[in-house]
Image (cartoon, rainbow, N blue to C red):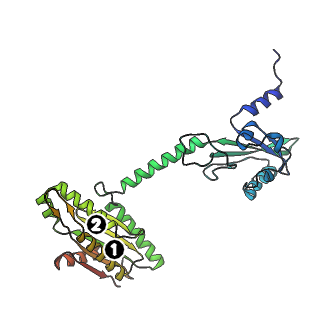
Amino acid sequence: METPSTARLSELALERVQLGIFAVDKNYRIVLWNRFMSEHSGLAADAVCGQSVFECFPDLPHAWLKRKFDTVFLLHSGSFSSWQHRPWLLPFEHDCPITGSFDHMRQDCAFMPLIENGEVVAVCVTIADVTELAAAWQEKERALDALRDSSHRDALTGLFNRRYITQRLATEYGAWLQRGEPFSVLLLDIDHFKHVNDTHGHPVGDAVLQNVAKTVASQLRAADMLGRFGGEEFIVILPGCPMSGARTVGEKIRLAVENDSLILPNATLRITVSVGGATIFEGVDDADWLVGEADHALYDAKRSGRNRVCITAVHA
């Protein structure tokens, strides 16, 4: 059997390779279009060759792609575009069953000069289907996000833990220094919690903590941040909230907890909380100082009979 010519072998490889390959001349006319491109675009080579790529595909990122082509023609060197920066060049459908969250094929694109007699006569573009790789990367990112989030959470209540809340307090304090907007902090303590544990046992105590966490969270804005600060104590960060607003939120929380109840097999357990808060103003040295003022206000609420709200305004 006669061995195919090098040109024929190149043509067969071009048609069979699992890459999209096309090329454009200096007028952006398509001069090469392989089978991958035909199958995924629905346009045969004889329908597009000789036509402007921008006329064939008017939704292409015209300015960006023109710069890519012009740079290759000018510099005689290639360039690359990752799916992470631009998910696709052409909106081809993918056939990967595990990528339900992707509407189109994810593509890595290379732009290479085709040089003849020292002159770039065309720019060749390769499109690699990296949808499976992108899906794996996305899944890994989700797992890392979940791991990072779990390190910030209290295992029992699912609320942010003290370490993370402390970091966010420092961030909020830094933002206040720049913007000058007030923010407030509330500390909540479950009244007579030791008695609950001693009387009903620690599993009930855990259920009380979870129930209070859920009730308090329902009274907050999306921008607010709720955390478990330790034991039966919770903390709320209220961005952009002045003293009057902090008092209102504290009262909402106190009433919601008081009106809620935990149904036990032989009893209905009613819980109350004491709330102390502080609002920041000029002269506060750091977020820890503000939390300390909220703690003093919480002590005042406890000393005054519990199930009440005390707010301290921090002045210079």
Q: Which residue is painted at 31% across and 78% down in the image? A: 278
Mark before the other along the chain sequence, 2 or 1: 1
Residue 231 quadrant: bottom left
Q: Position of residue 283 (x, y in %)?
A: 37, 82
Residue 234, numbered circle: 2
Task: Judge by depth and name the residue closer to the eye, 116 or 88.
Answer: 88
**Crowdedness of circle 1 by 10 Å Cα count: few (<14), some, many (20+)?**
many
Residue 20 quadrant: top right
Q: Which residue is painted at 49% across and 49% down in the image? A: 141
Residue 297 quadrant: bottom left
Distance of label 2 from label 1 (alpha carbons): 11 Å
Provide the residue designation for mark 1: 185
Residue kind at label 1, given as amino acid type: Val
139 lies left or right of 1: left
Residue kind at label 2, given as amino acid type: Phe
277 lies left or right of 115: left
